[in-house]
Amino acid sequence: MSIEAHRSWKGRKPKTYPAGRTCAFEQCEIVLSTYNKKKFCFNHAPKTYPRVRGYITLPINDDGGDK
């Protein structure tokens, strides 16, 4: 008795973007990956912060004084 198993590892294809795109920052000539959906390279991308659930993080005020 012969049992053959066949698995199809077909998954979703990665989304691609046009080749040859460059960073949108002035004077930056870095060519973006075809898998990068953003307009800017890592060095010029706007700073983003992750969503923190449960509490609000506040910047630390380190002016040396006591309250």
Image: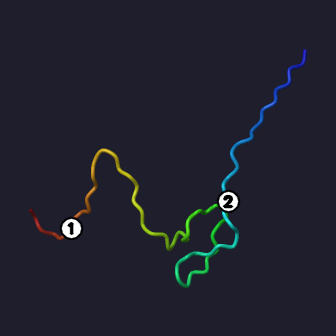
Task: State how far apart marks 1 and 2 are (Cα).
Answer: 45 Å
The quadrant the N terminus occupies is top right
Q: Quadrant of residue 61?
A: bottom left
Q: Residue at x 52, y 78 (%)?
A: 25
**Toward the viewer: 57 or 16?**
16
The quadrant the C terminus occupies is bottom left
Q: Residue placed farthest to the top in the image? A: 1
**Numbered disc in front, either 1 or 2:** 2
Task: From this view, report whether residue 65 is shown above or below residue 58.
Answer: below
What percent of the width, then of the height, locates residue 40? 54, 71
What percent of the width, then of the height, locates residue 13? 70, 49
Q: Residue placed farthest to the front in the image? A: 18
Q: Amino acid at mark 2?
A: Thr
Number of residues whose C-alpha sits closer than 10 Å to that of mark 2, classed few (under 14), some (14–19) or many (20 or more): few
Task: From this view, report whether residue 9 is shown above or below residue 28.
Answer: above
In the picture of the structure, the residue carrying the numbered disc 1 is: 62
Left or right: where does residue 45 sit relative to residue 61?
Answer: right
Task: From this view, report whether residue 27 is shown above or below residue 30.
Answer: below
In the picture of the structure, the residue carrying the numbered disc 2 is: 16
